[in-house]
Amino acid sequence: MDLWAAFLNKTGKQVDKWSHYFPIYDEILSRFRGLRLNLLEIGVAGGGSLELWSSYLGQRATVVGIDSLQDSRTSNINFKNPNIHFEVGDQADRVFLSGLIQKFGEFDIVIDDGSHLPSDVIASFEAIYPHVSKNGIYIVEDVHASYFKTHQGGLKKPGTFIEFLKGKIDELHSSYIGNASLTRFTTETESISIHDSMVIFKKGGSRWKSTVNSHDPFFTADSNGLVRYTVGK
């Protein structure tokens, strides 16, 4: 069952998501189904999305949601499923987030659907991303809020998540920039995918890169694209 079908057949707590998110989630989360993993969702409202993730990913997934009590829907959240956990806390509170990581360990999937305020989104990313597993993903939803004045935003306004993201694109490519130092983000991040209102950071660890020439007699590539060099005589 794909995520859209799981959403349509869901009972229990309500889920609110943009419809165009579902095929994106199917594409990026399908490889995690049935695996033992930790998922963290920031901002859960009534908790329906936590049930959806648990149903979609399977019984081996530990699903953790965090939210403040500012939303009345979070005040009485409880789950019969022992694999779903809810913690009360501020997504910008580094002490709270550090305790969360100590309690549950590294997260394989992180979804930020919290306040959408850039200060909160950036604070969460900086605190949690270093603790995402080496092949994990970090997703930020509703990044269009960076353009809203109601959310500390504005077009090309310094300090928004969109402007922060532009800096991360530079940081991903810092090995090509003169005098730029490689950061942990550079060496651990494989890709940044930008969709309408959603950004996905994918970890992949350091990878050897080199240009190759199809007419070079000293290399061969197997079906997986792995390049092997031979010493010329």
Image: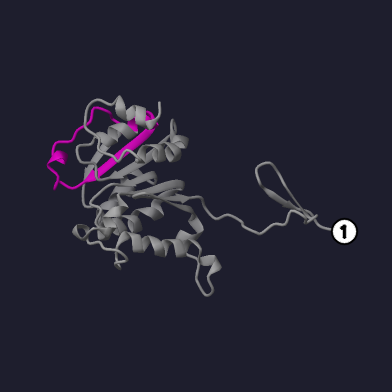
Q: Compared to 77, does 202 lie above or below?
A: below
Q: Amino acid at mark 1?
A: Lys
Q: Position of residue 151 (x, y in %)?
A: 21, 58
Nearer to the camera, 159 or 124: 159
Q: Which residue appears at 35% of the width and 53% of the height? A: 128
Q: Compared to 70, does 50 lie above or below?
A: above
Q: Position of residue 35 (x, y in %)?
A: 44, 33
Q: Residue furthest bottom?
A: 179
Q: Is residue 87 visible?
A: yes
Q: Position of residue 191 (x, y in %)?
A: 48, 53
Nearer to the camera, 71 or 17: 17
Q: Is residue 94 visible?
A: no
In the picture, measured across the screen, residue 227 lies left or right of residue 70, that is right
Quadrant of the rendering where the C terminus is positioned: bottom right
Q: Position of residue 214 (x, y in %)?
A: 74, 53
Q: Which residue appears at 34% of the width and 60% of the height? A: 162
Q: Which residue appears at 21% of the width and 31% of the height? A: 13
Q: Is residue 72 magenta?
A: yes
Task: Please give the residue where the numbered disc 1 appears in the rendered image.
Answer: 233
Magenta region: which residues? 54-83
Q: Is residue 186 magenta?
A: no
